[in-house]
Protein backbone atom coordinates (compact mmCIF):
# COMPACT_ATOMS: atom_id res chain seq x y z
CA UNK A 1 0.00 0.00 0.00
CA UNK A 2 1.30 3.45 -0.92
CA UNK A 3 1.11 6.20 1.73
CA UNK A 4 0.39 9.76 0.65
CA UNK A 5 3.52 11.70 1.70
CA UNK A 6 1.54 14.91 2.16
CA UNK A 7 -0.96 13.22 4.51
CA UNK A 8 1.87 11.60 6.48
CA UNK A 9 3.53 14.99 7.05
CA UNK A 10 0.37 16.73 8.36
CA UNK A 11 0.46 18.37 11.76
CA UNK A 12 -2.32 16.87 13.87
CA UNK A 13 -3.86 19.35 16.31
CA UNK A 14 -6.40 19.26 19.10
CA UNK A 15 -8.12 22.54 20.00
CA UNK A 16 -9.70 23.21 23.40
CA UNK A 17 -11.72 26.27 24.34
CA UNK A 18 -14.98 26.68 26.22
CA UNK A 19 -16.38 29.06 23.60
CA UNK A 20 -17.86 27.50 20.45
CA UNK A 21 -17.09 30.63 18.43
CA UNK A 22 -13.39 30.44 19.31
CA UNK A 23 -13.27 26.74 18.41
CA UNK A 24 -14.93 27.47 15.07
CA UNK A 25 -12.52 30.35 14.45
CA UNK A 26 -9.45 28.23 15.18
CA UNK A 27 -10.68 25.50 12.87
CA UNK A 28 -11.46 28.08 10.15
CA UNK A 29 -7.93 29.47 10.41
CA UNK A 30 -6.33 26.12 9.61
CA UNK A 31 -8.95 24.24 7.58
CA UNK A 32 -7.51 25.24 4.20
CA UNK A 33 -3.93 24.57 5.25
CA UNK A 34 -3.00 21.19 3.76
CA UNK A 35 -0.22 20.64 6.30
CA UNK A 36 -2.59 20.86 9.30
CA UNK A 37 -5.42 18.60 10.40
CA UNK A 38 -7.74 19.29 13.35
CA UNK A 39 -8.23 15.84 14.86
CA UNK A 40 -10.30 16.82 17.86
CA UNK A 41 -11.90 19.59 19.84
CA UNK A 42 -12.89 19.98 23.46
CA UNK A 43 -14.82 22.53 25.49
CA UNK A 44 -13.39 21.78 28.93
CA UNK A 45 -10.11 20.73 30.48
CA UNK A 46 -11.02 17.13 31.31
CA UNK A 47 -12.23 16.47 27.76
CA UNK A 48 -9.09 18.05 26.33
CA UNK A 49 -6.87 15.82 28.46
CA UNK A 50 -8.88 12.68 27.66
CA UNK A 51 -8.86 13.37 23.91
CA UNK A 52 -5.17 14.23 23.86
CA UNK A 53 -4.35 10.99 25.69
CA UNK A 54 -6.42 9.01 23.18
CA UNK A 55 -5.50 10.81 19.94
CA UNK A 56 -1.84 11.72 20.65
CA UNK A 57 -1.86 15.00 18.68
CA UNK A 58 1.30 16.79 17.60
CA UNK A 59 -0.03 20.10 18.97
CA UNK A 60 -2.64 20.96 21.59
CA UNK A 61 -4.06 24.49 21.54
CA UNK A 62 -5.55 25.24 24.98
CA UNK A 63 -7.56 28.08 26.39
CA UNK A 64 -6.08 29.11 29.74
CA UNK A 65 -9.48 29.54 31.40
CA UNK A 66 -11.69 26.50 30.94
CA UNK A 67 -14.26 24.94 33.24
CA UNK A 68 -13.30 22.01 35.44
CA UNK A 69 -9.58 21.99 34.74
CA UNK A 70 -7.78 25.10 33.54
CA UNK A 71 -5.15 25.19 30.82
CA UNK A 72 -2.26 25.16 33.29
CA UNK A 73 -3.45 21.94 34.92
CA UNK A 74 -4.14 20.37 31.52
CA UNK A 75 -0.66 21.36 30.30
CA UNK A 76 0.95 19.88 33.41
CA UNK A 77 -0.89 16.60 32.87
CA UNK A 78 -0.11 16.57 29.15
CA UNK A 79 3.62 16.88 29.89
CA UNK A 80 3.31 13.47 31.59
CA UNK A 81 0.62 11.73 29.51
CA UNK A 82 1.54 12.98 26.01
CA UNK A 83 5.11 14.26 26.43
CA UNK A 84 5.85 14.60 22.71
CA UNK A 85 3.01 17.03 21.97
CA UNK A 86 3.61 20.75 21.73
CA UNK A 87 1.28 22.92 23.81
CA UNK A 88 0.08 26.38 22.80
CA UNK A 89 -1.95 28.45 25.26
CA UNK A 90 -4.56 31.05 24.34
CA UNK A 91 -5.34 33.71 26.91
CA UNK A 92 -6.56 37.24 27.41
CA UNK A 93 -4.90 37.36 30.84
CA UNK A 94 -2.06 39.83 31.21
CA UNK A 95 -0.86 38.59 34.59
CA UNK A 96 2.82 37.62 34.33
CA UNK A 97 2.34 34.99 37.05
CA UNK A 98 0.32 32.92 34.54
CA UNK A 99 3.06 33.30 31.95
CA UNK A 100 5.76 32.29 34.42
CA UNK A 101 3.78 29.25 35.54
CA UNK A 102 3.11 28.21 31.95
CA UNK A 103 6.77 28.51 30.97
CA UNK A 104 7.75 26.43 33.99
CA UNK A 105 5.23 23.82 32.85
CA UNK A 106 7.00 23.59 29.50
CA UNK A 107 4.44 24.96 27.07
CA UNK A 108 5.67 25.80 23.59
CA UNK A 109 3.98 29.16 23.33
Image: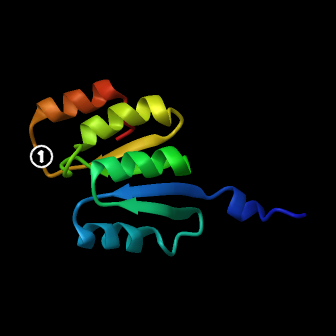
Q: Residue at x 20, y 34 (%)?
A: 99
Q: Residue at x 22, y 66 (%)?
A: 19
Horizontal side, residue 92 vs residue 57: left or right: left
Horizontal side, residue 12 vs residue 92: left or right: right
Q: Quadrant of residue 87?
A: top left
Residue sitting nearer the eye, 66 or 28: 66
Q: Which residue is mark 1?
A: 93
Image location (x, y in percent) of residue 72: 26, 37
Q: Residues within 10 Å of mark 1 (few under 14, many from 20)?
A: few
Horizontal side, residue 94 vs residue 33: left or right: left
Horizontal side, residue 103 vs residue 35: left or right: left
Label 1: element kind: loop
Image location (x, y in percent) of residue 12: 55, 56
Quadrant that contains the C terminus: top left
Q: Is residue 102 visible?
A: yes
How many numbered discs?
A: 1
Image location (x, y in percent) of residue 49: 39, 45
Outermost residue toward the left in this view: 95
Q: Residue at x 69, y 63 (%)?
A: 7
Residue sitting nearer the eye, 19 or 45: 45
Quadrant that contains the N terminus: bottom right
Image location (x, y in percent) of residue 71: 26, 43
Amino acid sequence: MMINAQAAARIRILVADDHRLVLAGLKALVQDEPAIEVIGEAMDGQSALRLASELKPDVVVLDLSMPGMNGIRVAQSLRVQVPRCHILILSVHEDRAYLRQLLETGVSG
